[in-house]
Every structure is written in structure tokens, then in C-alpha cells.
Image: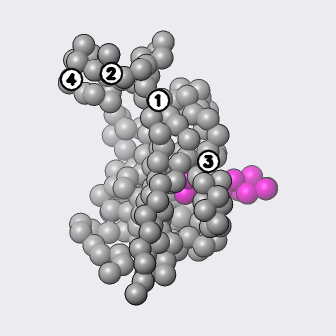
Amino acid sequence: MMTTSIRLLNDGTIKRDGGSMFGRLPKTTWENKVVTDRKNRMTLNLNCLLIELAGKTIIVDTGVGSKEVDGLRDEYGLGPSRLVKSLKSMGISTNQVDIVILTNLSFDHSGGCTKLDRTGNLVPTFPKATHYVQRECWEQAKNPSERFQDVYFEDDFRPIEEWDQLELLDGGHEILP
């Protein structure tokens, strides 16, 4: 009988504006329950899932990754990416990842899909993995509206298409039984 394992991977933390996180909920409702910094940002963990199922190693989302994007690290209070270290601490290399499932393509979910190699070229972080994403998410990231231009970066996801590691999904889809 095959065993299934689901574990959390940590890619560090991110700071997001409290108002944007709680939406229409008034600050007076949440301000005594959540600690914010002087910029009204709350600290959130960047967690990804590691699933081992049917002999496959699967990651759900990849965090922000290790690439430097102008001002992004400071604006969002990002520390160093920990995703690859988290995997290594579990005895898994990036070459052992078979599948990456992306819930969306914003930088905090897909930034870890790619990295810079020693010569400064963008390459997939998980060179043997098929990356699954909904077609609608892919189209939105490739052609973002004005509201979302600052959350999608082609360097995070375009190389997986160029390296033929992309599988677009339309609606519900069973990736593994």
C-alpha cells in the first residue's frame, strides 16, 4: 500500500498591509488581534505544501523565490527564500520534484519556480517537474489588468513554458489518482 505524506514547506515570511488582508472588515475589529509594524503591515508565513503521493513528489506553490526584484524585498519585508533549504532538510533535492501545482501566478505563489543560474540566466528551480496551472490564471498573469501589474512577474513563470514544463488546465482536473 502506497503511503501519502503531506508536509509544510516554509519559504520565509512576507509583510502585507493589514487593510488589504482584511478587506472591508474595519480595522477596529482586527487591530487588537493582529500585530502590525509602523507601516500597518502584518507578517505572514510563506508556506507551500510538499505532497508525496503515488511515488511522486509534489509541491503546491513555490513562495517568492530567490531572485531579486527591484524594491520588492523591501516593500514586502521579505527575507531570504527558504524553500530549497526546507526541501533539503527533508532529504529532497530540487531534481526529485516531479510536479509543481500553482494555485495562481502572483509572485508570492510562483516566484520560486525559477532562479538565476551561475551565469545569470533564468532557469527552472525544479528542472524535472511538470508545472500545472489553470489556463485562466496563466492568461491573467500574461496580460494583467492595471490592478494586478505589480504582482505578476514574467521571470517567475515564463521560463517554465520555454523549457516545456508547463501544463495548462481548464477547470477541475485530477493530476494523480
* Residue 78 placement (x, y as % from top left): 57, 33
Task: Find the residue positioned furthest to the bottom.
Answer: 1
Which residue is label 1 attached to? 43
Residues rendered magenta in the picture: 112-122
Q: Secondary structure at mark 3?
A: loop
Q: CA distance from mark 4 to mark 1?
A: 18 Å
Comparing labels 1 and 2, the label whose residue is closer to the camera: 2
Which residue is label 2 attached to? 33
Q: Nearer the viewer, residue 139 or 1?
A: 1
Comparing labels 4 and 2, the label whose residue is closer to the camera: 2
Which residue is label 4 attached to? 25
The image quadrant of residue 115 is: bottom right
Which residue is label 3 attached to? 82
Q: Secondary structure at mark 2?
A: loop
At label 1, which amino acid type do we have? Thr
Q: Secondary structure at mark 1?
A: strand
Q: How many marks?
A: 4
Q: CA distance from mark 2 to mark 3?
A: 27 Å
Please tell me which of labels 4 and 3 falls first in the chain. 4
Please tell me which of labels 4 and 1 falls first in the chain. 4
Q: CA distance from mark 4 to mark 2?
A: 13 Å
Judge whether residue 156 is colored magenta: no
